[in-house]
Structure formats: C-alpha cells, structure tokens
Image (cartoon, grey):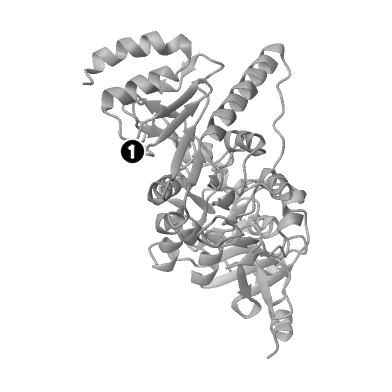
Amino acid sequence: MHWQEEFKKRLTTANEAVKAIKPGNRVVVGHAYGQPQHLVKAMIANKDAYADVEIVHMVSLSPAPYCNQDMQKHFIHNSFFVGVNSREAVNGGWAKFTPCYFSEIPRLFQEGILPVDVTLCQLSPPDDNGNCSFGISVDYTKPAAKSGKIVIAQINDRMPRTMGDASIHVSELDYIVEYDEPLLELGREKTGNSVMETKQYISKITAEIDIGRYCSELIEYGSCLQLGIGAIPDAVLPFLTEKKDLGIHTEMFSDGVVDLVEKGIINGSRKNLHPGKLVASFLMGTKKLYDFVHENRMVEMYPVNYTNDPCIIGQNDKVVSINSCLQVDLLGQVASDTIGPVQFSGVGGQVDFIRGAARSKGGKSILAFPSTAGGGKVSRIVPRLDPGAVVTTSRCDVHYIVTEHGIADLRGKSVKERARQLIAIAHPDFRENLERELENLRIF
C-alpha cells in the first residue's frame, strides 16, 4: 500500500479520533508550542465519555481546562513541569506533579514505567516519502508517539518541517486529523499600568540587562551555548554581537538566535559534535523563528534524551549553559522549581546541562537571576533555603552564579569562600544581614 493510501485510510475528524481515548487511559500531549490545540479541544468536548483519563505533559501554553477542579471526575493531570495553567491544580491537590530530569522523560515511556496509551501530537504534512515532521516539538513527543499504543496526529500545514531525528512515517499514525491553525507564539512582556508597576518593570529590565552583560563576559569565541527559557537567557544574546564562531546545542532556542545566525556570529564552526548545526529539542518563538527553521538543514532537532544527555553535551568543547533559579543559599544550594514547599515550575533541563557543561573541555555553567524578588523586598540569596524548598541543583554541581551585582565562581571554593562570594553579589540592602547570618551558621 502506498503511503498516500495509508494516509487516506487513517484520515478522520478530531471528534471521531478522540473517541479512541478510553476511561483510565494515559494520554501524552505534545509539548509547549507544539501542543495540538485542535485535538485537545476535541478531547475536552468529549469529556463526558471519560473517567480517570490521565493527561501527561510538561509545559502547556494554551488553555488547559482539564486542570480545572470541576474536571476531576473526567481528567487527572500529571505534570513534569508546572506552568501557569497547572500550578493551581498541582498545589491544590487535584493534579499530580512527577519530578524528573527532562532527559529522562522518554525513558519513562520507552521502558513502560509510565506506559503510554494515547499520544496527541501535531505534525507537518508528509513529504514525498510519507514522513511527517514533529517540527518545533520533538523533545519527549516523538518518544511518546513511538512508545504509545495509539497515535492521534493533527496535521497542520503551518508546522515547519525540521531536520535531524524529527520525523515519523504516516504508517505509524493511527488517526490523522487535517486541521490548519496558527502555531502558538512567544509574546512580549507588558509593563504594568500604575506608576509603581512601571518603575518595578524598569528596575527588572535594568537588572536583566546587567545580568546579560555579566554572562556575556563568560562566553568566549567558539563557545557552544545552551540557553534556557526566559528573560535572562534572552538578555544575554544582545551582548554577543562582538563574539565569533559560537555554536548552539540546547534543549530550546528562540528568535534571538536567528538574529545572531544571520549576522554570522553563530555558525557552529568550532563544534566537535554536529559542526555547523543548531541542535535543539523544541522551539519557542514567533513566526520569524518557525519560517527560519522550515526545511533549514542548518537546524537539527532531536529527542530530549539525546540533546540533554550530559555525555552527549560534553562532547562539545566550551559548552556554556545559562539557566535561572529562584533562590540560592550561602552553602551554594539552588532551588529552581519550588518556592518553599509550593511547586512553582520543574527541574526541566537545568541539571542535564549543568552536568553536561561540567563534562565539556572548558565548559561553564551559569545560574543567573535578579538579586531580589517582591519588588526589591526579598533577597534571593539567603542564609538557608526556605523551609520545604527542594534543592534542584546541588552545591557540588554549581559553577557560576550571576546577579546584576556581579559574578560568583563557586567551583573549587571552600564553603566559607562560596558564602563570601555570594554575599558580594547579593543586593547591597541585604549584605549586612547575610554577614550576620553567616556567623550564626558557623561555616568554617
């Protein structure tokens, strides 16, 4: 049977396809901006046919009504990374959180630790050989589709076709739903309306610019970059215009990388592994980014158990990982995914790349964040982590800590030397108290 015939045989509507989901099933949903919105809406519309259907994914950036408390008899959400749409449900107790390094999620599916009944994914149209691309979301989505019993695919003409290990053949899809819709795009942060909110916003932006400048000082010619999600990694990019021969091996990148590629600053020429290629697992950006990666052989997308494997990462020299966190104590312990006992986000790929950078010849890992929170009222460098806070990155893994007040290099430093360096980059309003607390901690 030619693939075109297989395609037609599997073609159906979203409303019909989601009937394949049965009570008690585990359903894995495509990640971030690759989420198949049309299929999720159809699943929600069919909720009365479900009981105890477990919805599994990392970040969802579109509406997630299955997280609503009144949906409990139909759905239970199991999150690997808590976001805006799931935070209330997880901390309210009507959704679950499963801690896991990003690189290890495919293994949960592949080895049957979390068996996959149904995968909902969004793909590009098939090429001449019948292969569809996972486009901007390969990450755990492809491993889930390969491991799942049933694959329901939304074919969206707007999904870019990406290269690397990013494809699946039509014959491996059980239900095909053709539905074109705009891909989700990364929005711009807006200022507040009041004078106070505007001042706080300006202060925040100023801090991010200073942090970006400090981080750029640690990036050398020929460095291979991993950029996490958020304002801090984005703030670094404008300071790289004088660098040369930078590379990309990351779990994700956004529009700012495209600008540096077009200027010739990022070319991957000094990479040991995948030279000349931008390697990633998922993408978050605007149409500019999606147009850039479409059928672009410079861009290679891989499942996250490859991109985030520390042994793979470390094969490139001068890897620089840039991530953020919520709190650091004077021992150098880092909390990135909880605020006290409250689950705020997840581990993601932070530890994967910190350990990968440590394996890299000349590698550096950076944790960068503004020195205060709460409009300047709370120090994020603290004597001890808040009660109940979870250590995301251990003090033995931490290398550089960066705030708007400078750089602390903790690698190879004694406990007291670490504390002194951290106090030096804390906000000046809190340094005196941190010094007093240091004496109480009896750190020698």
- List the residue tagged with mark 1: 394
Which image quadrant is residue 50 in?
bottom right
Q: Is residue 119 left or right of residue 191?
A: left
- Say what amino acid the circle numbered 1 marks: Ser
Give the position of the C terminus as an image quadrant.
Answer: top left
Q: Position of residue 317 (x, y in %)?
A: 47, 52
* Residue beneath the point at 72% across and 28% down: 190
| Rendered view: 89 above or below 139 | above
Q: Position of residue 409 (x, y in %)?
A: 40, 30
The crowding category of the residue bearing disc 1, from other C-alpha atoms within 10 Å (few below 14, some 14 to 19, many at least 20), is: few
From this viewpoint, is residue 383 visible?
Answer: no
Residue 29 lies, with reference to residue 374, above or below; the image says below
The local secondary structure at tag 1 comes to loop
Report the side of 212 relative to 41 (left or right): left
Q: Looking at the picture, does residue 217 appear above or below residue 437?
A: below
Q: Position of residue 333 (x, y in %)?
A: 34, 32
- Residue drawn at (77%, 50%), measured in percent from left and top? 287
Front residue (pair 229, 220): 220
Residue at point 39%, 48% (across, down): 355
Q: Is residue 198 left or right of 359 when viewed as pictured?
A: right
Q: In the rendered image, is residue 436 in sight?
A: yes
Please report the residue visible at 50 percent of the width from the left and 20 percent of the height from the top.
405
Residue 191: image quadrant is top right
Where does the N terminus fall, quadrant-wise?
bottom right
> Viewer-proximal residue, 69 or 258?
258
Taking the view exactly as shown, the residue that stands out farthest to the bottom is 1
